[in-house]
Image (cartoon, rainbow, N blue to C red):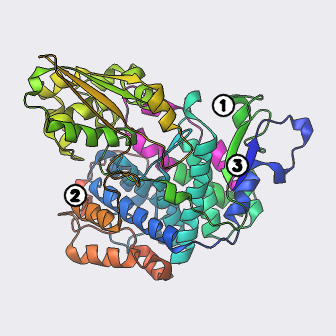
Amino acid sequence: MQEIKVQTHPSSALLKKEDQLAWKIAEIAADKSRPSAETIEMVINRIIDNASVAIASLKRKSVISAREMALSHPRKNGATLFGIDPKIKVHCEWAAWANGTAVRELDYHDTFLAADYSHPGDNIPAVIAVAQQTNCNGMDVIKGILTAYEVQVNLVKGICLHEHKIDHIAHLGPSAAAGIGSLLKLNKEIIYQSIQQALHTTISTRQSRKGEISSWKAFAPAHAGKIAIESVDRCMRGEGAPSPIYEGEDSFIAYILSGPDKVYNVPLPSVNQEKRAILETYTKEHSAEYQSQALIDLAISLNKKIKDFSKIKSIEIFTSHHTHYVIGTGANDPQKMDPNASRETLDHSIMYIFAVALEDGKWHHIKSYTPERANRKSTVEIWKKVKTFEDQFWTKKYHDPDPKQKSFGGKVVIKMDDGSIIEEERSVADAHPNGLRPFRRSDYIEKFKTLTEGLVTATETKKFLNLVQNLKSLKVRDINHLNPKIKFNLGKYSKKKETIF
């Protein structure tokens, strides 16, 4: 690996493009590195994972809206949509919009956490949509996805957006653009300009994940994928971009991030070195913010140790800075304690999540979030007793550079009315690569079958799973079948009113 030092330079310095981060990223996106069997297998896992959560969300309002917008942009040789007959195609940027929204809606796909947050699986809808419209094969798709993961994971390692209240899709735009560049075998100059355009146009604030969280949380990464496709198309036509996008004296680092005195260190593989960052990412067993995964497992375990939940006096969760301030009481969001809050808000409230998982001894992607469930009197009583605390021990573990030591859990102390105390801790989720039950191919397949039960026929399930597991050998025509259709006519769920499209 190489480490790229990134900082602001005055315009008078005339920083060479070869010394810019966007160019360094373009170099690896355009290289000739070969994927290993291990990384190819993980790409397959993540395509299965994305399909699982996307299909499970197809009847949800934001997904319906995104899909109807996409269907208003038909294209004969375009891209396909989750749930829809693959004979129906739309412009690839709109397919990325609809499919990206479906993937993100339930907050149930993969994650990578380091200096910042990310869901690298958000890259996949854009890469596959472009692949379908431009007649790419399975190996092209694999290389595009591996590049996108490599770029996003390493940007997340090196540059923190959250401390400046910038949403994490600012790393997704450049990674998707780089992945599309690899997919299409574009030259370095085009990829370089595309990355810069994609970053410049995907910078937004973290208000989308603060307070009363709206459906934009699902739309945001889909928007980044759509913007990335449009950026690449413009640059393929010979257009340029604001440059240098990271290092310019009026650019990203100078005025959005830490300013002229800050030096960021972004790791990247050397040119032609295998791209393995996808192996550092991890999926979710439970539909909720990733930092709650280990704590959900912990709550389910603790359920067996409590006979009378009404006798709980207090629940204290000692955890990392990020968990405490983003989904804990440190966020100071009253909405996180409101039984009438949106699903998007509740899946970012560890107080709510822990209370439900503790009381039920399980977690469900739909039933755990219903208004009736959130308003249950006994749950609200437990919910109000939960408080989080930052613990430097857990903060240090959260930021540990060693993937085998890095953790996203915490310690829970439950005090009962009779003075007894129940304590337990969990470093990582059970499904994490270092957890008690690491996710394997069989788990991804089981997740797909569980989430698509009653929606996808056995024949379509078999067809999709056979295709995707043979990804490296897929021909151009096969790529159109990577977004499984469901057995219902989605049109009947339409709530379309007077709109522009």
Q: Does residue 419 lie above or below 455 as drawn?
A: above
Q: Which residues are magenta?
A: 194-223
- In terms of secondary structure, what is the magenta stretch mainly? helix
Q: Is residue 478 left or right of residue 169?
A: left
Classify residue 87 as left or right of residue 116.
Answer: left
Q: Is residue 476 left or right of residue 459?
A: right
The amino acid on which the numbered mark 1 sits, given as a three-letter code, is Ile
User: In the image, residue 326 lies at what x, y percent?
Assistant: 43, 29
Upstream in sequence: badge 1 or badge 2: 1
Q: Is residue 102 above or below residue 265?
A: below
Can you tell which quarter of the image residue 310 is in?
top left
The image's mark for residue 256 is 1
- The CA distance from mark 3 to mark 1 is 15 Å
Is residue 389 in the magenta section? Answer: no
Name the mark nearer the viewer: 1 or 2: 1
Give residue 54's position: percent from left, percent from top: 34, 57
Question: Along the polypeptide, which appears first: circle 3 or circle 1?
Answer: 3
Q: From the viewer's side, name the closer residue of 414 and 201.
A: 414
Q: Which residue does the numbered mark 2 point to in the structure image?
A: 492
